[in-house]
Image: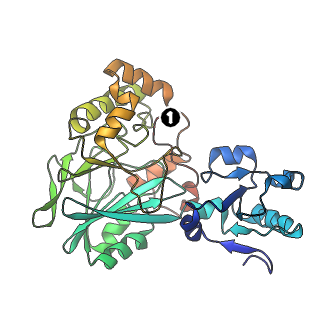
Amino acid sequence: MTSATISTITGDELVEHLDGSDLFLLDVREPDEVAEWQIPDVHNIPLGSLVDRLDEVPRDKDIVVICAKGTRAQQGAELLSRRGIASRVLEGGMGSWGSTYDQVSGEFAGATVVQLRRRGKGCLSYVVGAGERAVVIDPSRDLARYQEVAAECGWTITHVLDTHLHADHLSGARELAAASNASLWLNPADPFRFDFEPLVDGKSIELAPGVDLVVSSVSVPGHTEGSTMYQLGQHAIFTGDTLFLESVGRPDLADEAEGYAHHLFHSLHERVLPLSDDITVFPAHFGPGVAVRSGEFVARRLGELRDSLAPLALNEDEFVRWAVANVKDRPGNYRQIVGINAGQAEPDANAAELELGPNRCAIA
């Protein structure tokens, strides 16, 4: 409770209600703040305008008031309360939303895939297990999330993998590997400055007899030079930031957009698109245009993406021109984040603040 009369709701509790029709998300930040980063389907009425726009607030909905960290939302909820309108405040505001997760699981190629969705960041990570062993792909620094999944499934985390050197959020791969006494596998084409086991083409991890998580193509450069995808049998592929459900990875974060765009084209057309239409694509991120629903994977069959993503039908020159022309704002604080993820700097007590805001890893 933030006061005697105003109730609160946590990010985890909010996620459970997002699919419901009775929810009314009222964001009282300024329009430019909301345009920068928002929860899907919010209604923006700035705090200073709320009194004059009360007729826009329904009386028959479950109202959740949102701001950056909770202060303005509290003021807005108190204003509504004085006018007989009940509401709840999102604890910690958008700051806490950035660390809110849910998860979904399913069976692929004899293994169980658990997708953890960091809803406010659009980040996706995975625990893939069979028998007594599990691999974690693209973990965040919320290590307990992965440890709890493994414990609930009776798995030991034996390997931790990143698909690339991340620029939008802090990787937990190094910490999780150390905490789990697991092997850390990374692509040496990205400039990591700490100890890890280097990936080579075709390297595989046996989870259980007959169930291999295969590093099918170590070199899928384009988003980064060390971008890597991991294939689970003939049924699933973890594409990192090479291929998303709504676009492809941006090639400009190393300040070599044109050259990296050529690499990305070849990675897509030589390593990804030749795979079966029926293979399921699990990306590392989702953007605001991707619907996220309880109990459903953020994933699609490769054949569906082949048909729906226009850039995949472009020839190389067209693709490069499109990619270079359409990269927009870069992830906030990305240089500091890259430095920490590469081991060039250590995170401090305020490191989590670097991650606030949306991911911007796809070409718009």
Residue at image position (37%, 24%) is 319
User: Which amino acid, by three-letter code, is at mark 1?
Assistant: Ala
Q: Residue at 19% across / 58% down in the picture?
A: 109
| Label 1 Cα neighbours within 10 Å, binned few <14 / some 14-19 / many ≥20 | some
Q: Residue furthest top?
A: 317
Quick check: 286 left or right of 225? right
Q: In the rendering, at what x and y percent does residue 113 appear?
A: 30, 62
Q: Tell me the quarter of the picture where residue 176 sits.
A: bottom left
Numbered-mark total = 1
Horizontal placement of 141 versus 9: left or right? left
Pointer 1 residue: 364
Left or right for 332, reference 218:
right
Asked if residue 318 is positioned above or below residue 42 in the image, the reply reads above
Tell me, what colour scheme is on the image? Answer: rainbow
SS at mark 1 in the image: loop
Q: Where does the image place residue 51, in percent across and percent down from the top left?
A: 89, 56
- In percent of the image, x 66 and y 52: which residue is there? 42
Pick whichever, 329 or 287, lies toward us.
Answer: 287
Task: Spot the residue most to the left.
Answer: 209
